[in-house]
Image (cartoon, rainbow, N blue to C red):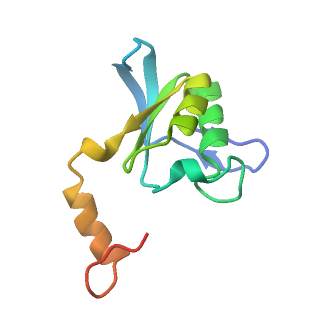
């Protein structure tokens, strides 16, 4: 599944599409997006960065694919979770997931010489 934004001409796809799973309130989840943003709730919506684009992008996905979910690898604040829920998106806390392989990749890709991951 993909769609092209009529305003920008950019093609968008979610991280996982055509899922057939249910959330905790029995609403179908048609797509899943994974985000590794720390402090995702601290940046206002509609700002010109990846974090500020979460709500507008989620609205587009809901319009094109239906209800969905976003897994926030470092958690999500209550206000952003509420805003997402209002448009049909479940905010999932990924802090309980085993992401050791991701962390090791990050150490080489965006880490300093001491192995610290630079956010």
Q: Position of residue 17 (x, y in %)?
A: 43, 33
Residue under the point 29% across and 76% down = 108
In the image, is residue 102 above or below residue 16? below
Q: Residue furthest front?
A: 78
Q: Position of residue 68 (x, y in %)?
A: 48, 27
Q: Position of residue 29 (x, y in %)?
A: 43, 22
Q: Which of 3 and 80 is in front in this view?
A: 80
Q: Which residue lies furthest to the bottom in this view?
A: 113
In the image, is residue 17 above or below residue 48? above
Relative to residue 13, is residue 97 drawn left or right? left
Quarter-wise, where is residue 87 in the image?
A: top right
Q: Where is residue 92 in the image (x, y as percent from the top left)?
A: 39, 35
Q: Residue furthest top?
A: 26
Residue under the point 20% across and 49% down = 98
Q: Which of 110 and 10 is in front in this view?
A: 110
Residue under the point 35% across and 74% down = 109
């Amino acid at each position: 599944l993909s769609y092209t934004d009529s305003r920008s001409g950019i093609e968008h796809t979610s991280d996982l599409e055509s899922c057939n799973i249910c959330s905790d309130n029995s609403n179908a989840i048609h797509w899943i997006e994974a985000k590794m943003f720390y402090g995702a709730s601290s940046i206002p919506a509609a700002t010109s960065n990846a974090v500020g684009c979460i709500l507008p992008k989620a609205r587009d996905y809901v319009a094109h694919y239906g209800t969905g979910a976003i897994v926030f690898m470092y958690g999500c604040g209550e206000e952003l979770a509420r805003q997402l829920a209002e448009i049909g998106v479940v905010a999932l806390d990924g802090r309980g997931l085993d992401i050791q392989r991701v962390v090791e990749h990050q150490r080489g890709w965006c880490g300093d010489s001491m192995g610290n991951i630079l956010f």
